């Protein structure tokens, strides 16, 4: 079973009450996720906040470091997630926050998680209803087992850039160091190669088919047996890219702190300019 589910497939699962729905709507520079959720969500979905539950407080490990396991566990239980629950996560459209949620749940030892392909936009396009009612789920019993998938920190990300492929999912201008709207220093990890996440998505926010993804990443030196990591600004878009690679049969390790961690230490080198490839 793949990690993506279509709107119609999800509607059938919801009708049979076979999944726990987690709303992770998120805008990096926009309104809080709770406001987006209040404006409309899938019926029965519980909101899980990216900043509060799916990441720890900003600091030397980046803007969206690993979450506190106890905080994450409490948030998942409050949403009714049980040890045996099949979970589906979704956001507004393109799977940005949903990809982070998918990765965090797997890191927490709960692999039964999928992403609504195309998010709530795909759900509404398919004619399915949206609600503003807040559910009151029976508390779950899920246990968080941190470290269930490997991660990269700044040191191991640098090693991946030297000995494998470190894919930087940001826009070309941020990668090249021409613009940096969020972090205090512009540029990229030396040796990282640029593959904007937008290239792995259709215009409607759904993920490209596995064969297309394999062709795109092969042009950047990534094949099934290539050691590969993903990085971005703060480990959100990079998780989305890890999801796209997963669907293409390629295992990628997430640089959780990404560029926002890298630049907390001024001794770390900064690269600018175009992708050497």
Image (tube, grey):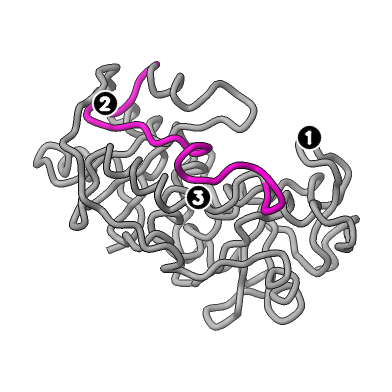
**CA–CA distance between discs 1 and 3?**
24 Å
Horizontal and vertical percent for residue 20? Answer: 23, 43
Q: Nearer the viewer, mark 1 or mark 3?
A: 3
The stretch in magenta equals 39-62
Q: Nearer the viewer, mark 2 or mark 3?
A: 3
Horizontal and vertical percent for residue 105? Answer: 38, 55
- What residue is shown at x 51% (from left), y 32% (from top)? 26
Q: Main secondary structure of the magenta part?
A: loop
Q: Pointer 2: residues within 10 angstroms few (<14), some, or many (20+)?
A: few
Q: In the image, is residue 55 part of the stretch drawn in magenta?
A: yes
Q: Pointer 3: residues within 10 angstroms few (<14), some, or many (20+)?
A: many
Quarter of the image for residue 15 reads top left
Q: Is residue 147 above or below residue 175?
A: below
Which mark is on residue 181? Answer: 1
Which mark is on residue 127? Answer: 2
- What SS does tag 3 mark? loop
- Residue on which the image places disc 3: 67
**CA–CA distance between discs 1 and 2?**
37 Å
Mark with earlier residue (2, 3) = 3
Classify residue 48 as left or right of residue 184.
left
Classify residue 64 as left or right of residue 211.
right
- What residue is shown at x 45% (from left), y 32% (from top)? 25
Q: Quadrant of the N terminus?
A: bottom left
Q: Quadrant of the C terminus?
A: bottom right
Q: In the image, is residue 222 part of the stretch drawn in magenta?
A: no
- What residue is shown at x 27% (from left), y 38% (from top)? 79
Mark with earlier residue (1, 2) = 2
Quarter of the image for residue 132 reads top left
Classify residue 30 as left or right of residue 104.
right
Horizontal and vertical percent for residue 140? Answer: 20, 45
Q: Is residue 244 above or below residue 95?
A: below
Q: Nearer the viewer, mark 1 or mark 2?
A: 1
């Amino acid at each position: 079973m793949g990690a993506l589910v279509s709107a119609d497939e999800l509607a059938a699962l919801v009708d049979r009450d076979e999944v726990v729905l987690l709303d992770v709507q998120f805008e990096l520079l926009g309104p809080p996720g709770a406001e987006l959720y209040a404006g409309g969500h899938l019926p029965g979905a519980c909101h899980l906040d990216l900043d509060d539950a799916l990441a720890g407080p900003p600091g030397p490990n980046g803007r969206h470091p690993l979450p506190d396991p106890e905080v994450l566990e409490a948030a998942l239980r409050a949403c009714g997630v049980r040890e045996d629950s099949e979970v589906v996560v979704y956001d507004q459209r393109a799977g940005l926050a949903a990809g982070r949620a998918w990765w965090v749940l797997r890191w927490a030892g709960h692999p039964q998680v999928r992403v609504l392909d195309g998010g709530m936009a795909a759900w509404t396009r398919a004619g399915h209803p949206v609600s503003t009612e807040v559910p009151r789920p029976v508390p779950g019993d899920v246990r968080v087992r941190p470290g269930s998938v490997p991660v990269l920190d700044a040191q191991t990300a640098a090693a991946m850039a030297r000995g494998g492929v470190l894919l930087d999912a940001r826009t070309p201008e941020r990668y090249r160091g021409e613009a940096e709207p969020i972090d205090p220093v512009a540029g990229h990890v030396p040796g990282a190669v640029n593959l904007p996440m937008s290239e792995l998505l259709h215009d409607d926010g759904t993920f490209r088919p596995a064969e297309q993804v394999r062709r795109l990443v092969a042009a950047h030196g990534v094949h099934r047996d290539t050691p590969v990591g993903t990085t971005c600004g703060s480990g959100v878009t990079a998780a989305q890219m890890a999801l796209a690679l997963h669907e293409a049969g390629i295992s990628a390790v997430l640089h959780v702190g990404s560029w926002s961690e890298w630049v907390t230490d001024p001794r770390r080198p900064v690269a600018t300019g175009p992708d050497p490839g």
